[in-house]
Structures are given as C-alpha cells and as structure tokens.
C-alpha cells in the first residue's frame, strides 16, 4: 500500500476511535444502572475483545503496568460516576485537563522537563477549568465536576504509566483492568434489573466504544504524527455533548461552554508544543 493510502487509512482509524469514544456520555446517561455495575458490565465485554486481540493473558507484571491498570480502572469509574452527577459535557471537558497533570507527573517521575509552551498551555487549561464552576450547579453537579477533574488526574497517571513501559504493551494493562473490574463487579451487576436494552448498551460500550476504539487508535497512531493524532482526538469532547443533547436533551451551561472551548485551546496548544519539541530533538 502506498504511503498516501496508508495515511488516509490511519486518519480514518483515528477518526473512528474518537467518534466511538464520544458515545460514552449519552449511553451512560441513558442507562439507569449504578456506575459500578455499568463499569463491570462494560469491562466484561471489553475483556473479551482484548483477549481476542492480544491472544494471551499477561503473566509477568511490573509496577508501571499495574499502575496503568489501576489508573485505567479509576478513570473509567470516575468518568462514569461524574457523568451521572453532572452534564456529560462537563465530565468529558474536565477530564481533558489531563495534560496539566501529565506535564507535572512526567517531570516528577520521568524527568521530562516542561517547555515554555507547556507552562502556557497549563495556564490556559486552568483558566478554562475555573469557568466550569461559574454556572449554577446543584450539590450533585458540583461533586460531579470534582470527580471529572479527578478523572483527569487518574487519566494522566495512566498516560505516564503507559509512557514508562518502554518495552511493554499498553493493551495488557487495559486487559488487566477489564478482568479485575469485571470479576469484582459481578455482585453489582446481579443487583440491577436486566433488560435487553441494558445489555445491548453494555455490549456496545465494551466492544465498540472502548474495545474497537482502542484497536483503531493503536493502528492509526503508527502512521500519523503525534500533533495530528492529538488534534483528531479532540473530536471526542466536541462530539460527546452533541450526542447527549440530540439523544438525551441535555445542554451545557454558558460558562461551561466558554470554559470548554478555552480548555480545548489549551490542549491543542500543548499538542503543538510537544510536536515542535519532538521535531527539534530529532534534528
């Protein structure tokens, strides 16, 4: 296959991954199950996809692999819970504050020094972050926003843990997380009311929204520069609240909308800075 066709295929894979990831908000809103039950059900189907994809169960573990798995579990749980408590838009936008924490954690644990652009993007993201609390929130909405911010922290821990696995496979950490939550969450699933719709939603979440999406992402990222991949990834926080508004009727507040746009600007600025730094190092 010629390079141009390979590139087009890679872009398509990344777009598909972002679109699939963006469907989580509306599906979590529709389901009336508790967060732990949703997490366990999705993990059940997700583990099947990853077992088929990897064709093995990890037998050797290291601290970074386990750290990534633990952070992966917490990120999923916090995001699902925050989506139940606040708007889906707030949940996904606040989770995208992760670059702030990635920068700090990578400096503390991996010795990767932040650039001036990194510091500037951190300030921009922080400004956007504060605007989310400008809208009138119920107590549940306030705590939902806090949990969404925490999901950004755990997402950063997950990313740094993946980055620290020089010879590892991130998919193994995902599989460990899926198997653990699926097993631990069985009692929570048994407490819920089972319907065909609920299991169809869980199957979609596990197989497509996170399973195939991750496979598409890993295939696409091999042929696309990091900056472009990051920019395509911002389709997720853009589409997530759109699906929720169209299919669930939930809209976001004025300040949250402004904050979300600023936050996305900070994420894009961070991606551009990282790409430039990588280009300079390659010279």
Image (cartoon, grey):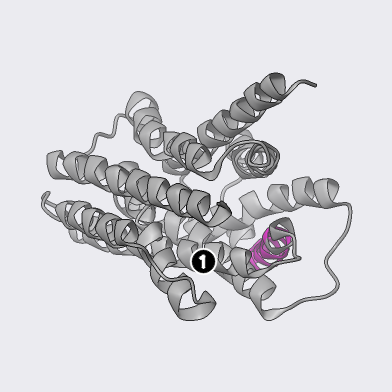
User: Horizontal and vertical percent for residue 48?
Assistant: 78, 49
Q: Is residue 264 left or right of residue 8?
A: left
- The answer to whether any part of residue 87 appears in the image is no
Q: Nearer the viewer, residue 108 or 24?
A: 108
Give the secondary structure at mark 1.
Answer: helix
Identify the residue shown where x is 58% and y is 34%.
Answer: 14
User: Horizontal and vertical percent for residue 15?
Assistant: 55, 29
Check disc 1 and report the residue beneath it. Answer: 74
* Quadrant into which the N terminus falls: top right
Q: Is residue 32 above or below residue 117?
A: above
Quadrant in which residue 246 is drawn: top left
Q: Is residue 104 left or right of residue 139?
A: right
Image label count = 1
The span picked out in magenta is 174-187
Q: Is residue 181 above or below residue 236?
A: below
User: Horizontal and vertical percent for residue 20?
Assistant: 55, 34
- The answer to whether any part of residue 186 appears in the image is yes
């Amino acid at each position: 296959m010629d390079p141009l066709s390979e590139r087009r295929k890679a872009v398509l894979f990344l777009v598909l991954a972002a679109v699939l990831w963006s469907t989580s908000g509306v599906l979590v809103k529709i389901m009336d199950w508790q967060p732990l039950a949703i997490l366990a059900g999705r993990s059940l189907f997700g583990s099947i996809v990853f077992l088929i994809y990897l064709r093995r169960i990890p037998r050797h573990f290291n601290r970074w692999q386990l750290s990534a798995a633990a952070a992966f579990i917490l990120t999923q749980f916090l995001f699902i819970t925050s989506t139940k408590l606040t708007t889906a838009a707030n949940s996904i936008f606040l989770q995208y504050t992760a670059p702030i924490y990635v920068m700090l954690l990578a400096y503390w644990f991996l010795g990767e020094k932040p650039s001036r652009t990194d510091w500037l993007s951190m300030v921009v993201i922080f400004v956007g972050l504060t605007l989310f609390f400008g809208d009138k929130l119920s107590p549940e909405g306030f705590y939902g926003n806090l949990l969404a911010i925490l999901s950004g922290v755990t997402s950063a821990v997950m990313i740094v843990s993946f980055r620290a696995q020089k010879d590892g496979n991130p998919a193994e950490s995902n599989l460990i997380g899926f198997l653990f939550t699926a097993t631990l969450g069985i009692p929570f699933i048994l407490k819920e009311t089972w319907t065909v719709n609920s299991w169809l939603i869980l199957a979609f979440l596990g197989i497509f929204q996170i399973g195939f999406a991750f496979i598409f992402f890993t295939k696409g990222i091999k042929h696309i520069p990091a900056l472009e991949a990051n920019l395509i990834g911002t389709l997720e926080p853009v589409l997530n609240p759109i699906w929720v508004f169209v299919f669930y009727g939930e809209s976001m507040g004025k300040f949250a909308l402004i904050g979300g746009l600023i936050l996305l600007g900070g994420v894009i600025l961070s991606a551009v800075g990282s790409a430039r730094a990588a280009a300079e190092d390659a010279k």
